[in-house]
Amino acid sequence: MATGNAPPSLQRHFGLMQATALNITMVVGAGVFVTIPLMLAHLPGPLAMLGWAFAGILIFLDGMVWSELGAALPGSGGSYLYLLESYGRNSWGRLMAFLFVWQFLLSGPLEMASGLIALSQFAAAIHPDFAQWNEAHTWKMPIMAGSDFSCTFSPSRGLAFVLGLLLVILLYRRVEWLGKLTMTFWLGVVGAIGWILIEGLPRVDFNRAFDLKTTEWPGGMTFAQGLGQAMILAIYSYLGYYNICHVGDEVRDPGKNIPRSILLCTLAIITLFLLVHLALTGVVSWREIPVKSPEVDSYSLSAEFMRRLNGEWAAVVMTLFLVWSCFGAAFAGLLGYSRIPYGAAKQGHFFQSLAAVHPQLKIPHRSLLLVCMMTLFWSFFDLTWVITALITTRILEQFLGQIVGLFLLRARQPLLQRPYRIPLYPWPCLLAAAGWLFVYLSAGWFFILLGLGTMTAGCLVFLAWSAWCKEWPFASPPNSHVQEMPWGPH
């Protein structure tokens, strides 16, 4: 009799194939096409493929961490939930959850801005004449003396900014019908990747792809420095291999399907991106690919690939595919990312003003506008800077934070049912932590300080906010172990 009055719950409708498809859908975007020239700036020729391989090993190891946490805590929220529960819901978990959302307000808009910047690069390369005109009307404003850190203003960046404004207008309304567009956006990049593999793999010239007769090393850096920079770019393209963890309470048999979907996704995308890299550089020699500004800002490797195989019409079609895909990725990302500050604020773990919902449109309008405006601001910065900044600001609070959290969760909740346990524990965790630290230290002193500064500022703001609200650590946590871990041993 009481079951009729029970509150509605989410349905577990994601099986293994659907969960794997969701992960791959979030990963497979236009990022692979813009990062290959940038990777060649750090590792020459075929050595750039090592960036994909070593970053692939890192995400495979890190995927084990996501798998154990996702199987043990199959709820919505992903990192936000894992950090909150692992460190203690009423104590240090509040700080870690706050820091995750705090860094997200920087890394999330940076990620979405990278899509708009990529869109501008693809649009600039739609025709050689437009590329020359765009380059002639490009102005760079240096931000830091002695470095490539700058803002870029050009016709193609202006187009990306206008399309970004269009996204804000589209998202600032009821979203029921907009969700139906996401599949058409994704089909654009799937079509582009499939077209490149079908056309390119049979025509790969292995002598061209694996040509390494050179004594010059890009940028005067060491191999380790170049590998670290290439891994940052590859990880950017791999982001999303854990996406199923954000909707864990909608997965059937999450103890099995979450780990399996992450494993299948990581193996699939590592193989796919290596093949795309091989197909492109097997047709277009890496020596002919511009790797530095301003030439790279108006260059599209995929368009040049199609131009050589099928003529100008194919380059234009490929460019339209990728512009459409970037627009769709930014749309889907802004739609989902705008809900993260809102969700944290609604649960009382972030600023309450961001929990506001528009009375007519029923959308989290303040959170949406904040994320959108920051995205538009970052869309004028250099792509390499944006990618490096968004990866390094996530490493401390999210990736390393989760690895430490997994150790804490095993120690604090030994009776918690764990359908998936990391094989050879703790070595995969330690190797993943070492990999993330290597990537972090490879980013350069500016980004190392940016990561530390973001975390330090977040801690100070959290303390001030907690003191104002009279919450932990300025108030004693509730004397209840049940609230620490609502999942309990099961």
Image: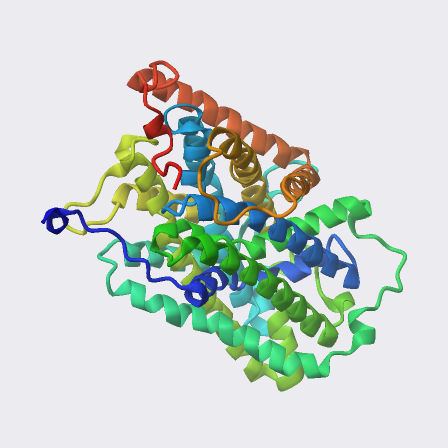
Please report the residue visible at 36 percent of the width from the left and 43 percent of the height from the top: 340
Please report the residue visible at 55 percent of the width from the left and 28 percent of the height from the top: 453
Quick one: 133 or 176, which is closer to the camera?
176
Give the x, y percent position of residue 210.
81, 69
Quick one: 404 or 396, which is closer to the camera?
404
Question: In the current view of this chain or complex, which residue is farthest to the bottom?
Answer: 310
Above or below residue 182? Residue 345 is above
Q: Quadrant of the C terminus?
A: top left
Dividing the picture into quadrants, the one containing residue 31 is bottom right
Please report the residue visible at 56 percent of the width from the left and 50 percent of the height from the top: 63
Give the x, y percent position of residue 75.
37, 46
Question: In the current view of this chain or complex, which residue is farthest to the left?
Answer: 1
Give the x, y percent position of residue 311.
62, 84
Dividing the picture into quadrants, the one containing residue 267 is bottom right
Please report the residue visible at 38 percent of the width from the left and 69 percent of the height from the top: 183
Dividing the picture into quadrants, the one containing residue 263 is bottom right
Task: State whether residue 382 appears in this view.
Answer: no
Above or below residue 115? Residue 424 is above
Task: State whether residue 98 appears in this view.
Answer: yes
Give the x, y percent position of residue 264.
55, 63
Is residue 329 toward the left or the right of residue 310 in the image? left
Quick one: 292 or 14, which is closer to the camera?
14
Is residue 342 toward the left or the right of residue 212 in the image? left
Is residue 148 toward the left or the right of residue 91 in the image? right
